[in-house]
Amino acid sequence: MTLWKSILAATALALASSTSVLAAKTDLVVGVVLEPPHLDPTAGAAAAIDEIVYANVFEGLTRIGPGGEVEPALAESWEISDDGKVYTFKLRAGATYHDGSDFDAEDVKFSLERAMAEDSTNAQKGLFAAIDTVEIVDPTTVKIMLKTPQGSFLYNLGWGDAVIVASESADGNKETPIGTGPFKFDKWSKGSSITLSKADGYWGDPVALDTVEFRIIPDAAAAVPALLTGDVHAFPNMPAGDALPQIQADPRFVVVVGSTEGETILSTNNKKAPFDNLKVRQAIAHALDREAIIAGNGSGFGTPIGSHFSPGNEAYVDLTGTYPHDLEKAKALLKEAGFENGFKATLKLPPPSYARDGGQVIASQLREVGIELEIIPVEWAQWLDQVFKAKDYDLTIVSHTEPNDIGIYARDDYYFQYDNPDFKAVIAELDVTSDQAKRNELYAKAQKIIAEDAVNGYLFQLPKIGVWDAKLEGMWENSPVQATDLTDVKWAE
């Protein structure tokens, strides 16, 4: 704590002199914790991709707004048939890509069919499973026919995985992204920063910022000085550590503790012994003390959860009491499962503090019931390759920040390796249900199934700790999608 006070005192003068200049600026430096593996949101699961390019560089037919609402984007309007199976989209006339090529219905057809294809590398391919055919009516009109009605279809089209790309430039989007958004890609200094600039000829309202630099700063030791000296103007998700109270007390900054869609979980390999045993997973659930995990997760903030669902959603059911913290019950379940003396396993931890710090707490808690965890720190790219793709893990900790994504538990190839026909039936019914009250009932049913099956250790909803210069306007307080949308951000005059 003394260290952070010293930093604050030493940099106060520098900050005071710099902030007077910032009000007139049209450039912005944004701090981000993770460097993305690449910049194509249609070909990767990393939230760090959308954090930079969603709504800034790439756009979909629809977009998700700051309150989680569905808004028009490259589709200015749409009509839905009475049976809910045909969507006719009117596209933006005059929209262009950053290389000067025109956006039209051909791009929509290409993008959706590419995402649906058998060899698709889209991390959320299931979003497009309901699509039967995509028909071009004219250059600014597209008709999408669904196999069955899907109540979440417009919402699904607002995910970063559903952005529209051009066939001519799609293959190069990982390194040189070309979209239709209000910002264009300028450069990527690997390991350091990614820079965007204002796109000329944007179809919508022009942005106020001329340049945006996303600077990669993974920890509090570097983030706090960067903020205090004015080198970084905003951290949408700041690794503040124990310096947060001092920053909160400083009127030169705005600190907003908002909500995210990030269900932070102890992900479990359900097809790997002994985690394929329900009693073992139940024992782990009883051994977890959520409040202690939240206190030690690097920020001290978070809302306890008992299933894979956001407390901010109207369909949320509080299931934290399904497996209350009970060490004796955990030990009894392990004994019933044949592990009276416990067992050893590995815990792979990606870089974020909620994982690295929270992992230490969880390892200590499981040790109390006889489960010895070998902690293996991995970089983000390693986590994606080893855990997410290869399913080479026992346990891991990660926040799933995709919006409203409980349906991932119905996927046969998902890295949890969970397989429950009853759960799949609920999700299948949900997919063809548009009545919101009925959808909420099905969401509740789905939450209860995976909670009772203890598929994963459900820990807490990841908070969004946003810190930025008090003269900045338009930053999002909450994160209904995994994005840093800068389209309305400006410096106060």
Image (tube, grey):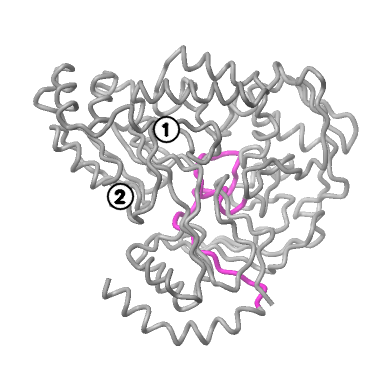
Q: Which residue is mark 1?
A: 318
The residue at which mark 2 appears reads as 356
The answer to if 430 sits in the magenta stretch is no
**Depth check, front residue: 286 or 174:** 286
Is residue 43 magenta-colored?
yes
The C terminus sits in image quarter: bottom right
State left or right for residue 207 relative to residue 256: right
Q: Position of residue 209 (x, y in %)?
A: 68, 68
- Residue in the image at 66% along x and 47% along y: 65
Dividing the picture into quarters, in which one does residue 471 lie?
Answer: bottom right
Q: Indicate the amino acid at tag 1.
A: Asp
Picture quadrant where residue 320 is located: top left
Residue depth check, mark 1 versus mark 2: number of the one nearer the observer: 1
Q: Residue at (79%, 40%) from the top-left corner? A: 75
235 relative to 367 in the view: left or right: right
- Mark 1 or mark 2: which comes first in sequence? 1
Q: Nearer the viewer, residue 407 or 315?
A: 315
Where 313 falls versus 282 (above or below)?
A: below
> x%, y% of residue 296?
28, 52
Q: In this picture, which residue range is highlighted in magenta?
A: 25-53
Along the line of sight, the residue nearer the viewer: 199 or 373: 373
- Image coordinates of residue 417 in percent, x first then y, are 39, 23
Secondary element type, mark 2: helix
Crowd tier of the residue under label 2, counting other residues whose Cα lies within 10 Å: few below 14, some 14–19, many 20 or above: many
Position of 58 relative to 404 (above/below): below
* Image quadrant in which the N terminus is located: bottom left
Regarding mark 1 in the picture, which secondary structure is present there? Answer: loop
Residue 240 x %, y %: 39, 63
Q: Residue furthest right?
A: 138
Taking 332 as reference, is 386 above or below it?
Answer: below
Give, as a three-letter code, the residue at label 2.
Arg
